[in-house]
Image (cartoon, helix red, strand yellow):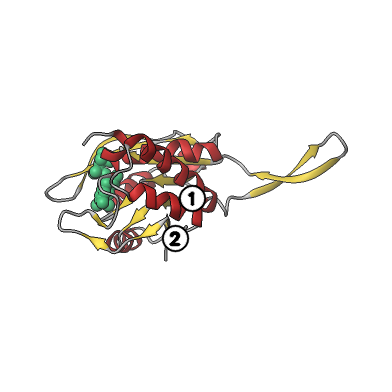
């Protein structure tokens, strides 16, 4: 069964409270999404495999741990997942980045796919899917289904706010995918928005409302 980790470090909680505020402007919102993603990435990468490597310091030669093999691929779900990319690349600059374009049909709330470009060597990498909002879970489930067709080594999902409905749907559809979120909110409203949430993440990142 999937592990669900709520990364509720005090710095993340503080930044998330500012993010939720409807008066926070787009430029600040974008910066906060990046900072929260960077802090969460630290936790989501805790189990990366290390190997012992010989290093010559100015004083002596000794063995130290470094990351083993090809590293990560981050896959943001467009649009809102894009806001998390710079933050995670700050921690793992050598990672590859794939993109999956999905939007929720406003009536059915079902995801509609319009773009998919993944790294060619994704089968040799561990994948972290990025999307700030896990609402019904439909977008994350669909994106992960697409990625699984390319046989990556493993897949994790990293969001910022999740609804209980989204966690349930994602863990049922993909029990092998570990989930990292900064907050688990109360519920979805009748329009599929997370309550209390932060509103429409894509619109707030890109100032399109
Ligand atoms: C938002 C969000 C997720 C999706 C979550 O994207 O960024 O991708 O909704 O909802 P779900 O869990 O019910 O699928 P949206 O469809 O608004 O597209 P956008 O990022 O382009 O604004
Ligand atoms: N997508 C968003 O951007 N916000 C929500 O609350 C739900 C889906």
Which residue is farthest front? 23
Q: Quadrant of the N terminus?
A: bottom left
Q: Residue at x 45, y 46 (%)?
A: 36
Q: Secondary structure at mark 1?
A: helix
Badge number at residue 68: none
Quadrant location of residue 57?
top right
Q: Quadrant of the C terminus?
A: top left
Name the residue beneath numbered marker 2.
6
Is residue 82 something that shows in the picture? yes
User: Which class describes the residues within 10 Å of circle 2: few (<14), some (14-19), or many (20+)?
Assistant: some
Q: Position of residue 119 (x, y in %)?
A: 44, 34
Q: Earlier in the sequence, mark 1 or mark 2?
A: 2
Residue 110 falls left or right of residue 73 = left
Which residue is farthest bottom? 1
Q: Residue at x 87, y 39 (%)?
A: 60
Q: Position of residue 67 (x, y in %)?
A: 63, 44
- Up/down of 110 relative to 58, above or below: below
Q: Position of residue 148 (x, y in %)?
A: 38, 48
Q: Residue at x 44, y 33 (%)?
A: 120
Name the residue beneath numbered marker 1.
40
Q: Give the alpha-carbon distance from disc 1 to disc 2, as whole Å.
A: 9 Å
Q: Position of residue 59 (x, y in %)?
A: 88, 37
Q: Residue at x 79, y 45 (%)?
A: 63
Q: Secondary structure at mark 2?
A: strand
Pick the front one: 152 or 96 = 96
């Amino acid at each position: 069964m999937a592990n669900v980790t709520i990364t509720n470090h005090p710095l993340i909680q503080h930044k998330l409270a500012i993010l939720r505020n409807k008066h926070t402007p787009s430029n600040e919102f974008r910066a906060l999404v990046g900072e929260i993603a960077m802090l969460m990435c630290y936790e989501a990468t805790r189990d990366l495999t290390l190997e012992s490597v010989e290093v010559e310091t100015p004083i002596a030669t000794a063995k130290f741990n470094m990351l083993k093999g090809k590293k990560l691929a981050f896959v943001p779900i467009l649009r809102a997942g894009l806001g998390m990319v710079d933050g995670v690349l700050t921690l793992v600059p050598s990672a590859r980045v794939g993109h999956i374009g999905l939007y929720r049909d406003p009536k059915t709330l079902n995801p509609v796919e319009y773009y998919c470009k993944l790294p060619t060597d994704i089968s040799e990498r561990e994948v972290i899917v990025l999307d700030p909002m896990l609402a019904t879970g439909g977008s994350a489930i669909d994106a992960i289904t697409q990625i699984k067709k390319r046989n990556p080594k493993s897949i994790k999902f990293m969001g910022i706010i999740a609804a209980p409905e989204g966690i349930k749907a994602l863990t049922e559809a993909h029990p092998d995918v570990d989930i990292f979120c900064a907050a688990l909110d109360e519920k979805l409203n009748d329009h599929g928005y997370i309550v209390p949430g932060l509103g429409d993440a894509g619109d707030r990142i890109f100032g399109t409302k």
